[in-house]
Amino acid sequence: MIVSASRRTDIPAFYFDWFCRRLREGFVDVVNPFNRKQVSRISLEPDAVDCIVFWTKDPAPMLGKLDELSDYSYYVQISITPYDMDIEINLRPKSDIIKTVQDLSMRIGRERVVWRYDPILLNDRYRIGSHMAWFEQTSKVLAPYVERCVISFIDLYAKAKKNTQGLNLRELSDDEMHELAAGLSRIARESGITLQTCSEEIDLGRYGINYGACIDGKLIERITGKPVNVGKSKSQRPLCNCVESFDIGAYDTCIHGCRYCYANVSAEKAGQGFEGHCAASSVLTGTLFGDEHITVHRTK
C-alpha cells in the first residue's frame, strides 16, 4: 500500500507531530470530503505500508523526527517557487527553506528529495524572464541535493480564479509553455537535474522533458527494491500518471495561504480547519462523532 501525505494539505509543515502519533498508533482515519459519515481507516503498520509519499512546501518539522520513519520507505516532494508574499502568504524565506531541503537531502539521500517547480504562473510581475533567472539561480544551489524537478503550468480552476482575483493571472499559451520549457530544460541539463512534467497534455519531449508522476511507481520501486503491482490512479485527472495510493489528508486545512491553491475554498476556511486540529485525534481535523461507517483498509 502506498500512502500519500498529502495532496490535500501540508502534513510535514503543519501536522507532522500528529502524523508521527498516527504511525505509533498504527492507523489513521480519513473522512470522505463529500460525506462525513464515510470514513476510511488506513493501516499504518510498517508491514502494510510499502512507501509514504510526502508533499510539502517546508519540511523543517520533519528534520528532528526522521527516526520516527525508520521502519518505512518514503520520499519527500518539496514545492519551491519564485513567488513572494503577494501569492504565497505564509511561508518562511525561500533561502531558509532551501537550506532545510539541503539538510534533509544530506540525511535521507538526494534520490528521495524531489523538487517541484509548481505551478508556473505568469502576470505583470512574474514573467518568463524572471522565471528563467530564478530557476537558474535556484538550480545551482539545489542540484547537488535533488535528482529531479517536476514542473506544471497553472490551471485556473474555480477556487483558484476566486482566490487570485487582482493578480491578473491567465492560462499560459502553448507558445509560452514551449518558451519556458526550452529555457528551463537548458538550465536543468546544465545543472544535472532531470526535468519532468506533472499532469500536462502538452508534449515537451523535444526539450528532453518527459511526462512524470508524483506518486511515481518507478521511483518507489527504486527506493523500496520491490515491484509496484498497482495500476494507474483512477481518482486523479486523466492526464495524471500517478499510481494508486491512499491520501490521508483533508481539504481546507493548509495555512500557507498560497492563493492559487486548489485544496482550500478560502484562507478563512483553511484557518478554521487548522484550528479544528487535535493532535490526539485519529482524523486530521476535528473528531469522529461515533455515527460514522468506518471501512478498514489494510493491504499487505
Image (cartoon, rainbow, N blue to C red):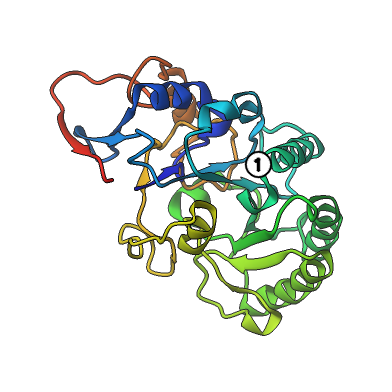
Q: How far from the left and from the top, in percent, is residue 203?
A: 57, 80
Residue found at x 53% / y 59%: 222
In the displayed structure, 75 sits above or below 290; it is below
Determine which quarter of the picture holds residue 131: bottom right
| Direction from residue 50 to residue 151 in the image, left or right | right
- Looking at the picture, does residue 167 appear above or below residue 213? above
Place of residue 265 in the rendered image (x, y in percent of width and height, measured from the top left): 44, 39
Provide the secondary structure element on which disc 1 rests: helix
Q: Is residue 228 left or right of residue 212?
A: left
Question: The disc labelled 1 sits on which kind of residue?
Answer: Ile
Query: Dot 1, how many residues are within 10 Å of its Cα: few (below 14), some (14-19), or many (20+)?
Result: some
According to the image, label 1 marks what residue?
108
Q: Position of residue 174 (x, y in %)?
A: 62, 78
Task: Please name the residue shown 37% across and 42% down the image.
Answer: 49
Query: Which sits in the foreground, 294 or 183?
Result: 294
Q: Residue at x 15, y 27 (%)?
A: 292
- Where is residue 126? Give x, y as percent: 76, 56
Out of 243 and 292, give the one closest to the viewer.
Answer: 243
| Residue 196 higher or lower than 179, as above or below | above
Which residue is drawn at the image coordinates 48% and 36% (left, top)? 266
Q: Give the farthest residue toward the front.
A: 225
> Which of the two residues, 141 or 90, is positioned nearer the viewer here?
141
How many numbered tags mark residues here? 1
* Front-lying residue, 251 or 76: 76
Assign the C terminus to one quadrant of the image. Answer: top left
